[in-house]
């Protein structure tokens, strides 16, 4: 009977395994193979071993793109979790218009990041932008600078726009976690003298473990693989100062360096994988 059950379960798993092999294992293997070649995407591929990887680590532009990607992730991922948790705590309370407030907070997340980037690009344009005209009518037009014209301000704008757009999605996951915590635990904690900050530290945070894990991992992946918002808002500029690895890969691929861009994609895969595995281990231990 056990052998028969095992055979049925194995048979049922075959479709899932085939899909996994076709859409993950094969592309991964093909990508690793292409990363070892000098291929322009059209002609015959020439095997060059680890030449693409050596070229990447000696390319100053590529090193700058790693810096930009990591800076964006270090600014965006923690802020998304902090702001999302703050929103969730506020929206978990009882007040009139709560459903409407939740809708407005979540609404930016359903808009395409490409469109969102173009919207903010038009808003932040000096002289022609809406915010400039608004400040100019208030007599504060001189305060408005070219916020997308320097590395520091452009990177800050990218982080804040990304957080503003996706904090609602993070909020929803935290809100689901908060609503799954039994109220009896807070009542019992109150009897033992745990209220306010103590209840948040010793009851809320530990029981939000699964929600924290999901949000931390998804925000790390999303921040390190960012493309749309940067492409539409700054285009990687000024110069290449806000260009990220995903944009660099796209430009190298369209620049007839398909083999090299595939090698960069493999490197990016490990850049994302390492912090994700670290976050998984850390959150599992804490949980």
Image (cartoon, helix red, strand yellow):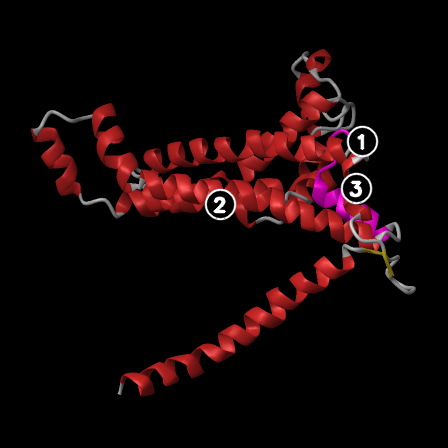
Question: Nearer the viewer's eye, disc 1 or disc 3?
Answer: 3
Q: Which residue is at the front of the view, 170 or 135?
A: 170
Q: Is residue 82 left or right of residue 193?
A: right
In contact (CB < 8 Å): disc 2 and disc 1: no
Image location (x, y in percent) of residue 113: 63, 45
Q: Distance between the residues labelled 2 and 1?
A: 28 Å
In contact (CB < 8 Å): disc 3 and disc 2: no
Dominant SS type (magenta): helix
Image location (x, y in percent) of residue 123: 69, 31
Residue beneath label 2, please? 277
When asked about the image quadrant of residue 88, the answer is: top left
**Residue placed farthest to the front in the image?**
49
Q: Which residue is at the front of the view, 99 or 240?
A: 240
In the image, what residue occupies the spot 26% across and 88% down? 1
Q: Is residue 234 left or right of residue 90?
A: right
Highlighted range, magenta: 241-254
Q: In this view, does 285 lie to the left or right of 265?
A: left
Image location (x, y in percent) of residue 120: 67, 35
Label 2 crowd (10 A; few <14 / some 14-19 / many >=20): few
The residue tagged with tag 3: helix, strand or loop? Answer: helix
Residue 54: image tag: 3
The residue tagged with tag 1: helix, strand or loop? Answer: helix
The residue tagged with tag 2: helix, strand or loop? Answer: helix
Question: Nearer the viewer's eye, disc 3 or disc 2?
Answer: 3
**Residue placed farthest to the left in the image?**
191
In the image, what residue occupies the spot 47% across and 40% down? 278
Q: In this view, does 127 lie to the left or right of 201?
A: right
């Amino acid at each position: 009977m056990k052998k028969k059950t095992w055979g049925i379960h194995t048979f049922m798993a075959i479709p899932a395994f085939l899909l996994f092999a076709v859409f993950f294992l094969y592309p991964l293997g093909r990508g690793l193979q292409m990363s070892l070649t000098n291929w322009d995407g059209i002609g015959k591929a020439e095997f060059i071993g680890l030449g693409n990887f050596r070229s990447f680590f000696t390319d100053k532009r590529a090193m700058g793109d790693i810096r930009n990607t990591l800076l964006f992730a270090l600014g965006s991922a923690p802020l998304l979790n902090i702001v999302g948790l703050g929103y969730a705590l506020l929206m978990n309370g009882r007040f009139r218009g709560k459903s409407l407030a939740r809708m407005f907070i979540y609404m930016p997340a359903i808009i395409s990041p490409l469109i969102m980037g173009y919207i903010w690009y038009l808003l932040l344009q000096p002289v022609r932008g809406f915010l400039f005209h608004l400040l100019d009518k208030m007599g504060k037009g001189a305060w408005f600078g070219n916020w997308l014209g320097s590395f520091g301000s452009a990177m800050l704008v990218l982080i804040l726009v990304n957080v503003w757009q996706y904090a609602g999605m993070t909020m929803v996951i935290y809100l689901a976690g908060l609503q799954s915590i039994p109220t009896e635990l807070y009542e019992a904690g109150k009897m033992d003298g745990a209220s306010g900050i103590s209840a948040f530290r010793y009851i809320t945070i530990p029981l939000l473990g699964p929600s924290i894990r999901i949000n931390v991992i998804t925000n790390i992946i999303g921040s390190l693989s960012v493309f749309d918002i940067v492409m539409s808002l700054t285009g990687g500029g000024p110069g290449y100062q806000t260009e990220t690895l995903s944009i660099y890969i796209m430009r190298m691929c369209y620049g007839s360096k398909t083999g090299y861009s595939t090698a960069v994609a493999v490197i990016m895969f490990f850049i994302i994988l390492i912090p994700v595995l670290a976050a998984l281990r850390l959150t599992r231990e804490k949980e």
